[in-house]
Image: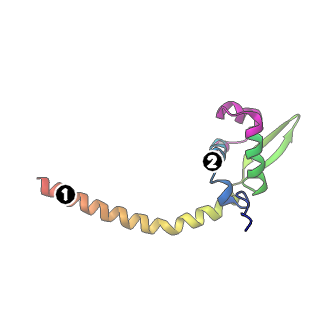
């Protein structure tokens, strides 16, 4: 059976740590490829490859500015990830509250 492409959707595209680093850099604003190369300490071909994947899933937009290509974050493309993670927020909150209760009990026992 053929394996599905790992970059077919936003979830899979951002599963790669370097791509998340690129997205983090783009949160602060538009960046050229050269700027991303300098900030991340990666080779230009690597950065370009990751940007291509992110562009294909719509997570980043690109525009030409003279001889440079400038990338910016497309937050709307990340919304499915946000929506999916948000479903777990209630569970995490409940578990942290239970953990707080246990810690409070332990503190009371130490006194």
The residue closer to the viewer here, 12 or 40, is 12
Residue 62 belongs to magenta span: no
At x 36% / y 65%, what residue is drawn? Answer: 95
* Res. 10 image quadrant: bottom right
Question: Considering the numbered disc 1 on the image, is that residue within a helix, a strand or a loop?
Answer: helix
Q: Which residue in the rendered view is the most extreme toward the right?
A: 66
| Colouring rule applied to residues | rainbow
Do residues under tags 2 and 1 come within 8 Å of each other at their CB atoms? no
Q: Quadrant of the N terminus?
A: bottom right
- Which of the two labelled residues, at mark 2 and mark 1, occupies the earlier sequence position? 2
The residue indicated by pointer 2 is: 20
The residue indicated by pointer 1 is: 106
At x 86% / y 41%, what residue is drawn? Answer: 64
- Asked if residue 20 is positioned above or below residue 7 in the image, the reply reads above
Magenta span of residues: 26-46
Which x, y percent locates residue 49?
Answer: 76, 44
């Amino acid at each position: 059976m053929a394996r599905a492409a790992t970059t077919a959707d936003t979830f899979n595209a951002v599963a790669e740590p370097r791509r998340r680093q690129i997205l983090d850099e783009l949160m602060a604003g538009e960046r050229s490829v050269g700027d991303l190369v300098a900030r991340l300490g990666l080779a230009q071909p690597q950065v370009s490859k990751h940007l291509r994947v992110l562009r294909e899933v719509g997570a980043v937009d690109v525009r030409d500015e003279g001889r440079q290509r400038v990338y910016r974050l497309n937050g709307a493309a990340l919304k499915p990830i946000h929506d999916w993670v948000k479903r777990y927020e209630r569970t995490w909150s409940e578990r942290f509250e239970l953990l707080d209760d246990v810690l409070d009990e332990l503190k009371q026992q130490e006194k």
